[in-house]
Image: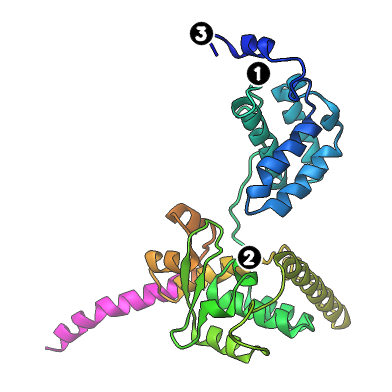
């Protein structure tokens, strides 16, 4: 490329037989999947989204034909049936594809994404699970594996994928620790195990020393958990009907498996652990990220206020006695 030569001038010099000439979105995604997606940790999920894109009418259009309003229009239409976070994940693939096409494949493409393209997402959730909801979910599943797994998740605040990929040779029951090698941020983390977490692991059948602890895939955990929540809600509604009570519209509603991590993290704070200790247990990198998953119950804060007041009151009482 000569000094001062534009990308457009360069493209005119490219041989007409270049495989990138007149490339459609669908064909570009095929190359992208082979060169980039296959190397990613979440390759399976991204490949599923790429297949969905290749079935979309946009797949037949040349890359050079797109403008930012195309993606904004897609986002608006897609939001009618999908969450904002889902739409952002779908468009993230396209955004990176265009970056790759411009930088690695040297295609003269215009920038596609502006501040208005992607839908805004609110990741904050203040959903706490009550003990009654937890017990109802546990009762609703006939799977002893899921029961133990749910209890273990509440004891450790571990992510779904971390629990799924746990191996027995990473668990030290004597030291009460589990070494996580496959975490979301790619960093190794040592998670301390409560007495209850150790009891759960010791109660599991099978050999302890080879293979994975739970032998269940992340998606299977989500599906089984969702079925248990639905059955628990149906059972609750039936009980209310039989006893002439109006069902609570919030009980066993809007619950996700990830809420167990949220709940477990909040409980760690309520037990009195400081922020640095909780972050070391959960693997959160920043206080802001940790705050997203933590919502303390008002009654727990009130109890902590009482403990602090009692602690400060003791010396004054001692002096008063003298």
Q: CA distance from mark 2 to mark 1?
A: 39 Å
Considering the image in quadrants, where does the C terminus appear?
A: bottom left
Colouring convention used in this rendered image of the protein: rainbow
Going by the image, does 99 lie left or right of 48? left
Label 2: which secondary element: helix
Q: Position of residue 246 (x, y in %)?
A: 81, 73
Residue 186 place in picture, x, y as percent: 52, 57
Q: Which residue is mark 2?
A: 161
Marks 3 and 2: which is nearer the front?
3
Query: Is 34 drawn above or below residue 250 in the view shown?
Result: above
Relative to 6, 235 lies left or right: right
Residue receiving disc 1? 108
- Which of the two labelled residues, at mark 3 and mark 1, occupies the earlier sequence position? 3
Q: Is residue 77 magenta?
A: no
**In which image quadrant can residue 258 be found?**
bottom right
Q: Could you tell me if the residues under marks 3 and 1 are in contact, i.e. CB atoms within 8 Å? A: no
Q: Quadrant of residue 163?
A: bottom right
Q: Give left or right: position of 318 versus 195.
A: left
Instruction: Report the span colored magenta.
Output: 300-322
Check the picture and name the quadrant holding the N terminus. Answer: top right
Kind of element beneath mark 1: loop
> Depth check: 321 or 307 in front?
307
Which callout, 2 or 1, points at the residue further toward the start of the chain?
Answer: 1
Question: Quick one: 74 or 14, which is closer to the camera?
Answer: 14
Instruction: Give the residue pinned by disc 3.
Output: 4
Quote the CA–CA distance across marks 3 and 1: 15 Å
Whether residue 311 is visible here, answered yes or no, is yes
Q: Earlier in the sequence, mark 3 or mark 2?
A: 3
Q: Residue at x 82, y 30 (%)?
A: 58
Residue 187: x and y in percent read: 48, 60
């Amino acid at each position: 490329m000569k000094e001062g030569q534009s990308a457009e001038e360069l493209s005119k010099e490219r041989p007409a037989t270049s495989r990138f000439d007149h490339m459609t979105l669908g064909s570009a995604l095929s190359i992208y999947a082979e060169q980039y997606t296959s190397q990613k940790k979440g390759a399976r999920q991204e490949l599923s989204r790429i297949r969905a894109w290749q079935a979309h009418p946009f797949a037949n259009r040349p890359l050079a034909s797109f403008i930012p309003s195309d993606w904004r229009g897609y986002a608006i239409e897609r939001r009618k049936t999908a969450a904002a976070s889902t739409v952002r994940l779908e468009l993230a693939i396209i955004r990176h594809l265009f970056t790759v096409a411009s930088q690695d494949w040297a295609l003269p493409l215009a920038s596609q994404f502006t501040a208005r393209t992607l839908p805004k997402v609110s990741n904050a959730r203040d959903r706490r699970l009550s003990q009654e909801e937890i017990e109802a979910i546990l009762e609703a599943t006939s799977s002893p594996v899921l029961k133990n797994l749910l209890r273990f998740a509440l004891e450790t605040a571990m992510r779904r994928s971390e629990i799924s990929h746990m191996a027995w040779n990473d668990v030290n029951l004597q030291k009460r620790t589990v070494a996580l090698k496959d975490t979301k941020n790619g960093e190794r983390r040592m998670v301390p195990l409560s007495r209850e977490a150790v009891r759960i692991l010791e109660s599991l059948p099978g050999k302890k020393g080879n293979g994975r602890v739970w032998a269940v895939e992340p998606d299977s955990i989500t599906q089984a958990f969702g079925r248990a929540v639905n059955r628990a809600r149906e059972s609750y509604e039936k009980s209310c009907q039989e006893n002439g009570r109006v069902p609570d519209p919030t009980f066993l509603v809007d619950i996700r498996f990830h809420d167990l991590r949220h709940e477990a993290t909040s409980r760690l704070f309520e037990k009195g652990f400081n922020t640095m200790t909780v972050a070391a247990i959960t693997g959160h990198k920043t206080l802001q990220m940790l705050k997203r998953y933590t919502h303390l119950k008002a009654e727990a804060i009130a109890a902590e206020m009482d403990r602090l007041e009692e602690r400060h009151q003791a010396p004054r009482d001692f002096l008063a006695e003298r």
